[in-house]
Image (cartoon, rainbow, N blue to C red):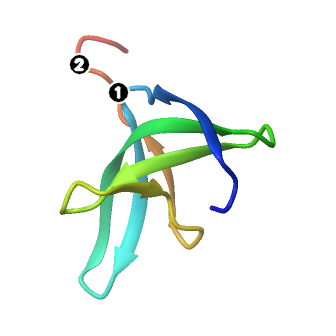
Amino acid sequence: MTEKIIQIIPAPENLYVVHEDEEGKFTTKVVCLALTGEGDVFMMDSDDYGTISEITPNHEGIRWHQLEGTE
């Protein structure tokens, strides 16, 4: 991302991104949504070291996990 982030908000607690590597598919939690000065919104996740960055364009998809106690 080359655009300047001007605001971040927490992502919904049940929003995940699906990745795939040589070991198979896995999910990571979307931690926040980033608004840029150009008006674009990017989903951000965290790696194993705690670095927060834009979700890679080659992700497999987005998943909403049902929250406990809801239908």
**Residue 35 position by quadrant:** top right
- CA gap between label 1 and label 2 equals 11 Å
**Are the two marked residues, 1 and 2, in contact with CB atoms closer than 8 angstroms?**
no
Q: Amino acid at mark 2?
A: Glu
Give the vertical position of 66 relative to 42 (above or below).
Answer: above
Mark 1, residue position: 13
Give the vertical position of 29 relative to 53 (above or below).
Answer: above
Q: Quadrant of the C terminus?
A: top left
Q: Amino acid at mark 1?
A: Glu
The residue shown at (67%, 62%) is 2
The residue shown at (41%, 59%) is 18
Mark 2, residue position: 68
In this image, 52 relative to 37: left or right? Answer: left
In this image, 41 relative to 51: left or right? Answer: right
Identify the secondary structure beneath mark 1: loop
Counting from the top left corner in percent of width and height, residue 5 is at 61, 42
Give the vertical position of 15 relative to 69 (above or below).
Answer: below
Counting from the top left corner in percent of width and height, residue 61 is at 53, 58
The residue shown at (39%, 51%) is 45
Q: Give the total of numbered labels.
A: 2
Which label was assigned to residue 49?
none
